[in-house]
Image (cartoon, rainbow, N blue to C red):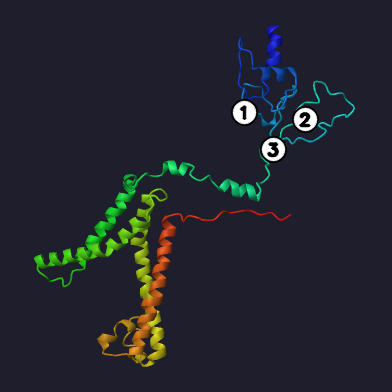
Amino acid sequence: QQQQQQQMYYPPPHPMAPQYPPPYPPPPHHAAAAAGYPLPPPYYYPPYGPPHPSYRNQYWGNNNAARSPNTKNIPGTDTTGVQKDPRQKQDNVSSTEPPPPSQISLTEESPPSQEQQIALTKEPKGALTDKDSLAAASLAEASANITFDSIQKLSFVLATTLLLSYCAVSPRSLPIIDYNDHFKRNCRLVAISALPSLLYCFCVFDHAENDINTIVGTFYTAFTVGYAGSFVSEIVLATLLRLGVFRIWEPSIFDLTPEIPVVVLPWVLRETGYRPKRITLFVADFVTSCLAGALVEEFFKWLAVKLSGRLPRNFVTVRKEIA
């Protein structure tokens, strides 16, 4: 009799269902399902909670085996896909038997509608998300999350700044005391010029939405690749634009070639004693400084941010299907 009970109750209705070894009997809804008795909706028996999500392809009202998740429920067929005889009497099936589960398979799910996609992207106001739980609570805590790689980058930037300030002292033949005074003056100028940018950065920096290491990486990329690229690009573009302006307003300047190469001609006019017109100098300075220089700098700013960080997207991608 115990063996018959085990055959009746075991194996459980689903492979992932909880096991109940003897002498503990299974819950009433498991026993009823194993015996073939239909259960009234909602598919579970109080005080037991709803079934596990893995039971989604299991009939609870009969003693059939669990369905394969990749097998579609075709009307008029059994679990194996064999056509049923409509005249055949169905045993252990009641008129109050709940309908079969959803016919959506685990691998072929229909895409969500436009309203569902918009609803999934909206979060209740004031709700705490994983991003909020991992975010820093203050600026000091955000600074404490800085990595060793970011410290190395900041140290390299500081050392390079001091070295360039020391090499920028002119003239080189100054006494050691005067040379050090000029070096300290250069350091003060660099610090004063960097102070407004740092204050502006701290004003717009949100410790809950940004990462301090990403900020350091962006600054390092702008200091190295951005500065070198913008410097070379501005020199090349300024040379071409000055030559074009001289070609229009001052064509006689090209009489100095080939003694002076065309590439260095816009930069050695003072040494040669040639004095261009005022309109020529104004147009050349305006085009190179106000137009070309600003465009090149903004382009390399955008490039530095794109290379070192991921820009946020303030829009929701919605896929609209046309019937």
Can you say whether 211 is above or below 172 in the image?
above
Q: Give the residue at x 69% y 9%.
A: 3
Residue denoted by label 2: 80
Label 2, residues with CA under 10 Å away: few <14, some 14-19, many ≥20: few
Q: Give the residue at x 90% y 27%.
A: 87
Residue denoted by label 1: 52
Q: Give the residue at x 35% y 92%.
A: 255
The quarter of the displayed image where residue 33 is located: top right
C-beta proximity under 8 Å, tags 1 and 3: no
Residue denoted by label 3: 105
C-beta proximity under 8 Å, tags 2 and 1: no
Can residue 11 be seen by looking at this rendering?
no
Q: Give the residue at x 40% y 64%.
A: 301
* Residue 146, percent from left and from top: 33, 47
Q: Nearer the viewer, mark 1 or mark 3?
A: 1
Type of amino acid at the residue the image marks with label 3:
Ser
Name of the residue lying farthest toward the right: 87
Type of amino acid at the residue the image marks with label 2:
Thr
**Of residues 126 and 257, the one drawn nearer to the viewer in this rendering:** 126
The quarter of the displayed image where residue 104 is located: top right
